[in-house]
Amino acid sequence: MPKGSKPQRAQPRTAFQMLQQQLKWVDIVFEVLDARAPMSSRHPEHLQIFGNKPRLVFLTKDDLADGKVCREFVKRLTKSENERALLLSLKTRTRQPEVVAMALELSAEKIKQIEAKGLLPRPVRICVVGMPNTGKSSLINWLVGKKQVKVADRPGVTRGPQWIRVHPKLELLDTPGILPPNISNRNIGEKLGIFNLAPPGAYSPEELADRAILELETRYPGALRKYLPDAEEPKPVPVKVVDPEDEEADGGRHWLLERDLATVAGMEPSEINQKTGTLDDLDDGESDQVEADDADAPDENDADLELAAQKQILLPVKINLSLLAERKHFVTAKGRPDTARAAAILLADIRAGRLGRITFDSLDPK
């Protein structure tokens, strides 16, 4: 280094380092979360990253998320006058004045500090931050709109970033701050992957689709059944229920069709001997005979017909990728259900909102 020359400041190399540089020059932080997974899409170290800077937290993609759940998240995330939350759809700009007003309220203290120091008034500077694909760039475009905006260079930040005037008292840093996803566990990682927020290749589409099916069946049990082709209501399957006191009748057991027995027991049809109707590989090493005794079936004139009808039950249909592929007629070259294609289609439809408005995070996760 030549004598008397100043050491050059190390240039930020990563997105995280770039964000840390940006935060030094802003007054307010706009934090962007995906409303379909608000807590999973929030960096776990957000308190350390943003410090005490005033913050407006946006839950974007309101049109795709569960509004009732997200409104509760907004209440939870609005912790003080210095940190507020807002559920927002970026498909209409009707709430843009409201966002500007909230930003001005958050910046009131900063404006007072500038005036107290006798400095010339300047617009309050804002940085938009969040994980990839949460809607940061869309939020910037939403705030700016299609009108011609005043753009000016400001010194002090590496490579002189552009500041966009969105209001006479507000300027927005046009480069969104990128927070790399911190996948602390598989539970969070799979949720991020379902909504295309995790790094590509972190999980296979089939893994993500399996998790999505589990979440949907737990939180929105009717969504998948409406989504499945030919998803009519399942018809009652007649099941002969034996009187507990009659231990000798049918050996004290129920009888079911082979297909339905496999559904109830959680077994694959291959586990049932298709010729004899017996179950293979039972724990006790023996097979239970499963027979549909036509001789005992009630005739139309039989007095037991009404009783048998009353004892019919609805057997649940277990939805998985194989069933989804079969219903959508996705078949591999070998004639097997194409679960890979079914997974890709399901994930695309979830992300597009074709299964309804959903949120996979809970207010009180266990």
Image (cartoon, grey):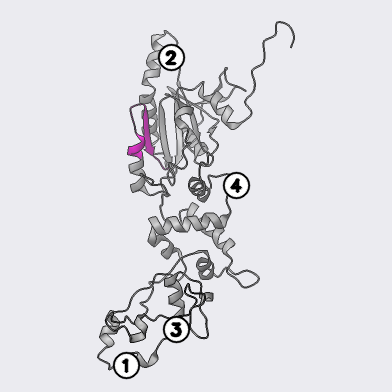
Among the two numbered marks 2 and 1 on one chain, the one whose residue lies closer to the N terminus: 2
**Number of marks drawn:** 4
User: Is 90 drawn above or below residue 329 in the view shown?
Assistant: above
Q: Amino acid at mark 1?
A: Asp
Residue 200 is marked as 4
Are the residues at dot 1 and dot 3 in contact (C-beta closer than 8 Å)? no
> What residue sits 62% from the left and 69% below the top?
332
In the picture, the quarter occupied by the N terminus is: top right
Outermost residue to the top? 4
Q: CA distance from mark 3 to mark 4?
A: 49 Å
Answer few, some or many: residues within 10 Å of disc 4's Cα (few below 14, many 20 plus, some between 14 and 19). Answer: few
Q: Amino acid at mark 4?
A: Pro
Q: Amino acid at mark 2?
A: Pro
Q: CA distance from mark 2 to mark 4?
A: 45 Å
> What residue sits 38% from the left and 62% below the top?
222
Magenta residues, start to end = 74-89
- Give how far across and how far down residue 187 sits, in percent: 48, 48
Among the two numbered marks 1 and 3 on one chain, the one whose residue lies closer to the N terminus: 3
Among the two numbered marks 3 and 4 on one chain, the one whose residue lies closer to the N terminus: 4
Residue 141 left/right relative to 311: right
> What residue sits 46% from the left and 77% below the top?
259
